[in-house]
Structure formats: C-alpha cells, structure tokens
C-alpha cells in the first residue's frame, strides 16, 4: 500500500488557507515518526494507520484538529494531550488555528511513536 494517498493531498488542497500549513506539518511529522504509516480517508478526514488506526487530522472553517485513536493510553509527561471533550473541538489538542498552537515537534513525535508501538505490540486496553 502507498504511504501517501492522493486523496489526502486533495483534502489538504481544499482546506482553508490557514489550515494547509498545519495539515502539511502534521502529515510530515506522522511520516517522520514511522515510514510504515499509511494514509486513508475515513469519516471524511485523513486518518493514519499502522496495524490499526494511529491518528487523524481534520480542517474546519476556523480551526484544525489532530488526535490520537488511543489517546487515553499515551504516556504524556508534558500534559499536552487533552483527553476530554473541549467544546467545539475534535481531537486532542483543542482548536488549532496556527502552528504556534501546537506542542513542540519532539513531543508530537514521541506521542506518535508511542501510538505506533502500541499498535505494533497489539497492546489492548
């Protein structure tokens, strides 16, 4: 299966201009975390998979979102992963309106690698 999906390119291209750099950055980090991750569109937005769902991203009119499929299981010493529902948000990082709203790349990469490892090891809740 192809690592990159042209439907995700289309999704990013149709997103609001403010969201495009955010989505491109998420995508780059996901693939940097693991070259084994593949892309798909599920429920109308890009999802990233490796032996199951790993994470997703989405763009809306005024914000973007990024979340982990198994967020409750991640070790998050920096405390950046929101695990409850934030009003008007989908994902684990609240309403993202610019790259400045994101945690540091090193933190995101660690969380992504954890999520991939959980799927690799078939860790069950």
Image (tube, grey):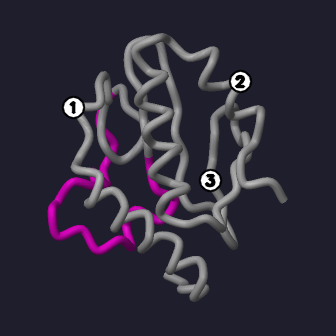
Which residue lies under the disc numbered 2?
10
Q: Is residue 71 magenta?
A: yes
Q: Position of residue 36 (x, y in %)?
A: 66, 68
- Quadrant in which the N terminus appears: bottom right
- Residue at 15% x, 62% y is 78
Q: Using the numbered discs, state the Cα–Cα distance from disc 1 to disc 2 in whole angstroms.
A: 24 Å
Q: Indicate which disc, 3 or 1, sits on the residue closer to the N terminus.
A: 3
Which residue lies under the disc numbered 3?
48
Observer-side mark, 2 or 3, equals 2
User: Element type at marker 2?
Assistant: helix
- Towards the viewer: 7 or 121: 7
User: Element type at marker 3?
Assistant: strand
Locate residue 37 relative to residue 82 in the image: left or right: right
- What's the mark number on residue 122? none
- Region rendered in magenta: 67-87
Q: Indicate which disc, 1 or 2, sits on the residue closer to the N terminus.
A: 2
Q: Residues within 10 Å of mark 2 (few under 14, many from 20)?
A: few
Up-down relation of residue 111 to residue 45 (above or below): below
Name which quarter of the figure residue 74 lies in: bottom left
Q: Using the numbered discs, state the Cα–Cα distance from disc 2 to disc 3 in whole angstroms.
A: 15 Å
User: Element type at marker 1?
Assistant: helix
Q: Is residue 86 magenta?
A: yes
Q: Position of residue 29 (x, y in %)?
A: 45, 51
Which residue lies under the disc numbered 1?
100
Locate residue 98 relative to residue 65 in the image: left or right: left
Q: Are marks 1 and 2 in contact (CB under 8 Å)?
A: no
Name which quarter of the figure residue 101 lies in: top left
How many marks the image carries: the answer is: 3
Q: Position of residue 4 (x, y in %)?
A: 71, 46
- Residue at 53% x, 72% y is 116
Q: Using the numbered discs, state the Cα–Cα distance from disc 3 to disc 1 in whole angstroms.
A: 23 Å
């Amino acid at each position: 299966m192809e690592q990159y999906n042209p439907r995700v390119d289309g999704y990013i291209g149709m997103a609001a201009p403010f969201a495009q750099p955010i989505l491109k950055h998420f995508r780059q980090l996901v693939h940097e975390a693991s070259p084994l991750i593949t892309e798909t569109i599920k429920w109308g937005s890009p999802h990233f998979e490796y032996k199951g769902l790993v994470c997703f991203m989405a763009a809306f009119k005024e914000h973007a979102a990024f979340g982990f499929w198994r967020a409750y299981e991640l070790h998050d010493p920096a405390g950046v992963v929101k695990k409850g529902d934030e009003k008007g948000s989908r994902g684990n990082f609240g309403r993202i309106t610019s790259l400045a709203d994101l945690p540091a790349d090193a933190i995101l990469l660690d969380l992504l690698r954890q999520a991939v490892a959980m799927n690799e090891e078939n860790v069950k809740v």
